[in-house]
Image: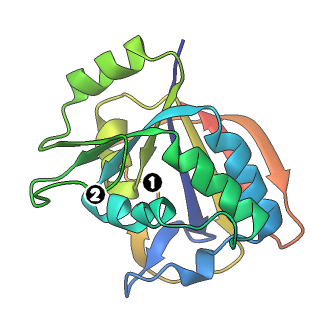
Amino acid sequence: MAKLIYAAICSIDGYTEDAAGKFDWARPDDQVHAAVNELERTIGTYLYGRRMYETMRFWETVDPTSAPPVAAEYAEVWRATDKVVYSRTLDAVSSERTRLERDFDPDAVRALVAAADRDVSVGGATIAGAALAAGLLDECHLFVVPVAVGGGLPAIQPHGLVGFELLDLRRFDNGTVHVSYRL
């Protein structure tokens, strides 16, 4: 049975981007990037909001012959995965295997996950917050970077009390910690 998974890289104080909207401090090294690649290999469909899609669309353009191996591997994984973008402002999508939806419909997402033969990933804190509020998330994976940014976009946006059960935790040489939870 497929799961709906939220994965994010965040600061130690819980933000995916700082108050200026930047996330350059979150760039993973090769060891962390390889762990992200491993997690992403299980995904059959990505669900994105407009901003996350516009960021991730970069992977459509990566030249695997000139990119570092870990980046080339991620580009291959990303390109081979279906994508659904939720946006009321985009006129069209510009990547392969991508469709545009105007509204995040929890019932449609529930049906998508139920029919999927591979896990579904929700990408972006805002869309993940909507999935969390609708009770759709099965797992949460946070790659916590050892930097505090003091404000910005929270990685987790609960609408009330939400319990998490620790599944695993892994430390990386650069101080990043991967924490995974079941909801």
Question: How would you rate the neighbour count of disc 1 (Cα within 10 Å): few for under 14, some for 14-19, many for 20 or more?
Answer: many
Residue 104 percent location from the top left of the image: 20, 39
Q: Which mark is residue 156?
A: 1
What residue is at 23 percent from the left and 23 percent from the top? 108
Drawn side of residue 28 relative to residue 51, left or right: right
User: Quadrant of residue 50 in the image?
Assistant: bottom left
Q: In the shown orientation, is residue 74 left or right of residue 96?
A: right
The residue that appears at 73% across and 43% down in the rendered structure is: 38
> Which of disc 1 and disc 2 is earlier in sequence?
2
Residue 59 visible to an observer of this rendering: yes
Residue 148 in view, yes or no: no
**Mark 2, residue position:** 94
Whether residue 162 sits left or right of residue 52 in the image: it is right
Q: Quadrant of residue 9?
A: bottom right
Where does the N terminus fall, quadrant-wise?
Answer: top right
| Discs 2/1, front | 2
Q: Amino acid at mark 1?
A: Ile
Residue 31, horizontal then vertical, whole percent: 83, 62
The residue depicted at 49 percent of the width and 69 percent of the height is 15
